[in-house]
Image (cartoon, rainbow, N blue to C red):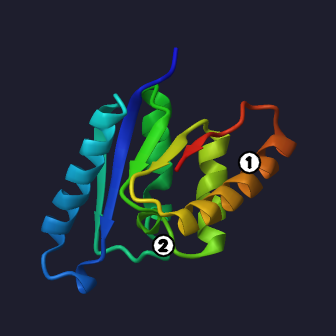
C-alpha cells in the first residue's frame, strides 16, 4: 500500500519579504491544495523564517528526516524547489539524504526547465545512494 502521509516544508527570508508570515501562510495553502488533489495526509508542517536559501533546509533537514522516520512518513511537499536550495551542492546533499531515508520529494510549482534540472540532480543522488546500498529507488514527482 502506498504511503500517503506527508510533511510540508516552507521557508521565506524575512529580509526579502515585508510580511514573512503571510508568505509562509501562502506556501502552506498552496501545498495543502496540492495534497488534497493527490490524496495525501498532512501530518506536520515545518516552517523557516529568515533562513538563507543557500543554507535553508540543511539546518532543518535532519529534524525533518527523523520526524518522517519516527512517524512512518515518506513524502516531503514543498511549494517550489528554491524552498529547499539554490545551489547544486546543497541540492545534491538534500536529495541524497532523502534517498537514503526513503523520502519522496514532491514539488508543487515545477515548470519544465526546473523539472529537468531536478530530474538530473535526483538521478545523480540516487545513483550514489544505490551504489552504497541496495535500498529501493527514490521517486520524485514533478
At mark 1, the secondary structure is helix
In the image, residue 107 above or below residue 23: above
Query: Which residue sits at x=31%, y=51%?
Result: 46
- Residue beneath disc 2: 55
Query: Which residue sits at x=58%, y=76%?
Result: 87
Residue 142 image offset from top left, x and y in percent = 52, 50
Report the front residue among 80 and 129: 80
Query: Which residue sits at x=75%, y=32%?
Result: 135
Query: Which residue sits at x=25%, y=85%?
Result: 15
In the image, residue 24 above or below residue 55: above
Residue 26 image offset from top left, x and y in percent = 19, 60
* Label annotation for residue 126: 1
Please give left or right for residue 108 compared with residue 47 in the image. right
Q: Is residue 77 visible?
A: yes
Report the front residue among 67 and 134: 134
Asked whether disc 2 touches disc 1, contact meaning CB atoms under 8 Å apart, the reply is no
Amino acid at each position: 500500500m502506498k504511503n500517503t502521509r506527508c510533511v510540508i516544508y516552507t521557508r521565506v527570508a524575512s529580509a526579502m519579504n515585508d510580511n514573512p508570515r503571510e508568505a509562509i501562510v501562502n506556501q502552506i495553502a498552496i501545498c495543502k491544495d496540492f495534497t488534497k488533489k493527490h490524496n495525501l495526509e498532512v501530518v506536520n508542517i515545518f516552517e523557516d523564517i529568515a533562513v538563507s536559501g543557500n543554507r535553508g533546509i540543511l539546518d532543518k533537514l535532519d529534524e525533518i528526516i527523523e520526524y518522517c522516520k519516527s512517524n512512518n512518513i515518506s513524502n516531503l511537499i514543498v511549494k517550489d524547489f528554491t524552498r529547499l536550495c539554490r545551489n547544486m551542492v546543497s541540492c545534491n546533499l538534500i536529495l541524497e539524504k532523502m534517498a537514503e531515508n526513503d523520502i519522496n520529494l514532491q514539488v508543487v510549482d515545477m515548470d519544465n526547465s526546473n523539472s529537468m534540472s531536478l530530474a538530473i540532480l535526483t538521478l545523480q543522488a540516487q545513483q550514489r545512494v544505490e551504489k552504497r546500498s541496495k535500498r529501493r529507488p527514490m521517486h520524485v514527482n514533478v
